[in-house]
Amino acid sequence: MNFILLSLAFAIAHAQEAPANEPAETPQTTPESSQTPTQPVTPAPKARVPTPGPKFGDAHPTLALTPERLTALRQYRARQLSVRGETELHGGGTRVSSFSSYPYSWGMHTTVVSDPISTTRTWGLYQGPRRLSAPEFLLLAEETERHQQLVTAIHLAERKSKRWFRVAGVGAAGIITGMVGMAVADEMEPYLLWNRVTFGSSTVAVAGLLGASFPSAKANRLQRDPSASFAIEQAHQWTDGHNEELRVELGLSPEEVWLLEMGTEGR
């Protein structure tokens, strides 16, 4: 009886320990489950280093300085038009006066008086190093109509001046005639007559000189002073147009012309 109970207890204990001793099942792994999902890695962009471009003033690779281009640059420098500032000086004369202190003992005294110098800012027109008159500039700038109008005004003023100079010449001739008549007059009445002729001729000569001075000065001013005919803004506009046509004619680049103009400015 005891043997049966021991056998039964041993069988139950063996049955309970058997599942614990069996090897545990290992989960099967698939290729999909063994790899963890990762995001695609994009490479960081490389820093771009800017390449330095040509600086202003560098020689253009296609514009090498050949003898032909050097000749063209020299022609441009000699034929270009420019507007330059000028300074006119006025005054500056000196007056010297002397007097004696005789019969005193301190001798001769001299006084020197100097007039102050004043300046006036003006502007002029140039072709290369040569100063141009206003008609010459308009002719080179191909402003034919304005050139003709200015030349007509100058000729009109010159004709008026010549007429007044003829009047002054008649007066000078009358002065000479009256002086000769007074010299040969034997009586008072002819002498007084020639004296009146001399005085009247002097008045005519002075009036002729004064009348000729105004149109002569106007003609001279129209000839040499461009501000009497047109504004400086128009002069710059015509100068730029002429220089651009000259640049195209000689086949020069804008950079070459600009550097050349900066180098010749103020000459």
Image (cartoon, grey):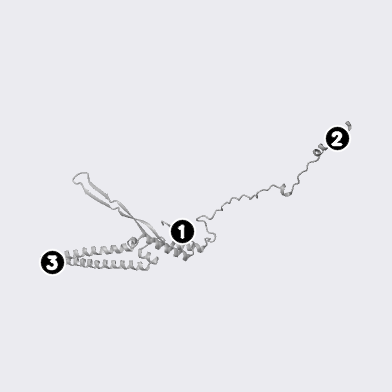
In the picture, measured across the screen, residue 254 lies left or right of residue 99, that is right
Q: Residue at 88% across / 33% down in the picture?
A: 4
- The percent coordinates of residue 9 (x first, y second) are 84, 34
**Whether residue 187 is visible:** no
Residue 193's mark? 3
Q: Nearer the viewer, residue 168 or 190?
A: 168
Viewport quadrant of the N terminus: top right
In the picture, measured across the screen, residue 17 lies left or right of residue 160, that is right
| Residue position marked by numbered label 1 in the rendering | 258
Please report whichever mark, 3 or 1, sits nearer to the chain's N-terminal start. 3
- Dot 2 falls on a residue whose secondary structure is helix
- Nearer the camera: disc 3 or disc 1: 1
Contact check, label 3 and label 1, Cβ < 8 Å: no
| Residue position marked by numbered label 2 in the rendering | 8
**Whether residue 240 is visible:** yes
Distance CA(mark 1)–CA(mark 2)? 120 Å
Q: Residue at 40% across / 62% down in the picture?
A: 239
